[in-house]
Image (cartoon, rainbow, N blue to C red):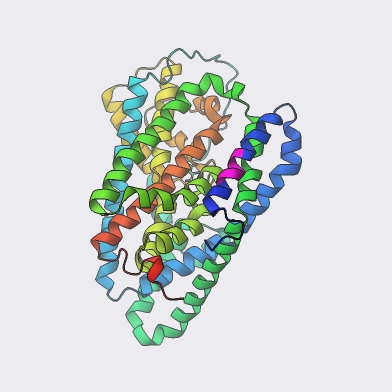
Amino acid sequence: MQKKKSGLSLPIRILIGLVLGIIVGILLQSNPEIADKYIKPLGTIFLNLIKLIIVPLVFSSLLVGVADLQDVTKIGKIGLKTVVYFLATTAIALFIGLLLGNVLNVGGGFVIPTGDITYEAATAPSFIDTLVGIIPSNPLNSIVLGQMLQIIVFALILGAGLLAVGEKGRPVFNFFNGIAEAMYSITGGIMKLAPIGVFGLITPVIANNGPGVLLPLSRAILVVYLACFLHAAIVYSSTVKYLGKMSLKKFYKAAFAPWAMAFTTSSSSGTLPITLETAEKELGVSKSVASFVLPLGATINMDGTAIYQGVGALFIAQVYGIDLTISQQLTIVLTATLASIGTAGVPGAGMIMLAMVLQGVGLPIEGIALIAGVDRIFDMARTSINVLGDLACSIVVAKSEGELGLAPPEEVAE
Ligand code: ASP
């Protein structure tokens, strides 16, 4: 986020890209193929640029973050706080989603034309499989395949190893530190293209899913958006303010760029470079905390996804005329918490994992076909909340470790 020549800050330019994209999308509703053919590639190029740096960025920044901790016990402390925050906020998110879904009767009045509903049952790996698979037996293979959880585990292990051998590991540390720095710098360059990328991503979504398509599902969309909003307003605001002792104005102002990126790319992983930059440069989170909490959060902390999965399950139950008991709804809280952890930070992943939640309470998986058409609209909301949750956590953890605002942007030399 460098000084701007045009006089407009990056968030404003991203916002302009977003609004322009919506307008052009509406104009192209009758000819969505034009949007798909000529405008979507802009978004795809932008996404590819971001994807290109994800694996080296996550690996090197996490490894350096761990290896840079003075003391091995600190990893455990930060790790514990992070995971507790992630789990607690995800469970609260589900309660908010289910409460709103029940109160607002999310699927009420929408009768499904049963019969022609088809949905290919997605392969949702079981929780145990996910746990076992987390330890990569062949880490280089995981890197090649871009398996984020495994990459994170390998980076943590190698980082801890470097920490343990001290000086002998210096050359390796410096090597990865160099890679991490280069990735941050590349991120800055890519971000300058964000307004165009955002425009290219949003236009085809609007052109293809005109407001008409959204109508039957508007109540479900409304509930998810409202729940996401309330979750941020209540949970993130209070934890940032009271635990992180940071002004909300500062937090939300800085969070706008990652929020907008997440909203338009629907990818927590894709947004990670910007989230990292914002946490460190704008919010003063120390590098070691940011590079631990944020990559982990982009992979396992998905409050927006949990809200969507909870509300989605309720919606499907209601349109199928199935009454869920309280204990079934508690099962949803549990399975959706796990499902959101297992959801990859890429577009559409939350919908695939919704199958796991539906299965957990015996709801028809075919119900996913009902919401699949507008999944992207849900995805935009849930991803932006996912990312906001990661940022909030980084502030809370950094504060508790005395690692917040030690080197605010103004004071950073260079
Ligand atoms: N797109 C979401 C994310 O990247 C995951 C999901 O589909 O829920 O955070």
Q: Measured from the top left, where is residue 205 in percent x and y?
A: 62, 35
Q: Residue at x 41, y 27 (%)?
A: 223
Residue 16 forms part of the magenta stretch: yes
Image-quadrant location for residue 153? bottom left
Q: Is residue 32 above or below residue 132?
A: above
Q: Is residue 192 above or below residue 37?
A: below
Specify whether residue 157 is in view: no
Where is residue 125 shown, x and y percent of the image?
A: 46, 44
The residue closer to the viewer here, 372 or 33, is 33
Q: Is residue 402 left or right of residue 59?
A: left
**Residue at the spot x=41%, y=21% of the render?**
106
Which residue sits at x=39%, y=87%? Answer: 168
Tell me if 290 is positioned left or right of 245 in this view.
Answer: right
Q: Does residue 240 show up magenta in the picture?
A: no
Find the magenta span and give its range.
15-19
Residue ranking furthest to the bottom: 168
Which corner quadrant of the image does residue 362 belong to?
top left
| Residue shown at the point (47%, 47%) measured from the top left | 259
Q: Nearer the viewer, residue 17 or 114?
A: 17
